[in-house]
Image: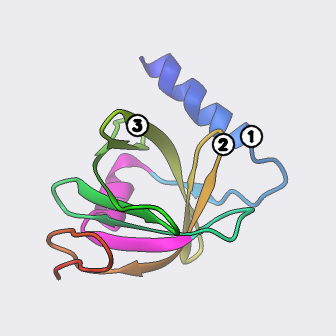
Amino acid sequence: MRQRLAGALLAAIVIVPGVSMGEIMTKEEIEDELMGVTVSGVIEGTDLGWRECIDREGATFYEVEGERARPGRILVTDGGLACFSYGAIASCFTVMRDGPYYALVDAVDRFLIQRIERPVRRCTPANDAVS
């Protein structure tokens, strides 16, 4: 299992050559900084905006421009991967910090976090987060 997670982490880093990667965040840093927040930004290389509300217990709502909001869950692994699941769809990301900004990076996408709203107690779709 650890080899598989390490391989996923390495793949995420290698797939995005030439881009400033920043500092890889630990499980504790991810849980402290990205739980109980609403994050939003763009998917790098596209004009697509996205938003994800993440409550302290791990319930989420993910929205990307032009699509319906998807309820889901986040699990942060001991290896420091942020794994999001929305029913049968699941993806794990390395979380990077570069100064005041963050990025969620996997083998395919780089979700740039450009805004963080705190605190959020409970998530609902379409900017209806309860704080």
Please state which of the two labelled residues, at mark 2 or mark 1, is closer to the viewer. 2
State which quadrant residue 81 falls in.
top left
- Numbered badge on residue 70: none
* Mark 2 or 3, nearer chain start: 3
- Density class for disc 1 (Cα within 10 Å; few <14, some 14-19, many ≥20) is some
Q: Reply above or below: 83 against 70.
A: above
* Residue at 30% in and 61% down: 61
Mark 1: which amino acid?
Ile
| Span highlighted in magenta in the image | 26-41
Mark 3: which amino acid?
Ile
Please state which of the two labelled residues, at mark 1 or mark 3, is closer to the viewer. 3
Mark 2: which amino acid?
Val
Q: Which residue is tagged 1?
A: 15
Q: Is 6 a magenta residue?
A: no
Question: From the viewer's perspective, is 77 left or right of 95?
Answer: left
Q: Reply above or below: 94 against 21.
A: above
Q: Which residue is tagged 2?
A: 108
Q: Is residue 79 visible?
A: no
Q: Which residue is tagged 3?
A: 89
- Density class for disc 2 (Cα within 10 Å; few <14, some 14-19, many ≥20) is few
Q: CA distance from mark 1 to mark 3?
A: 21 Å
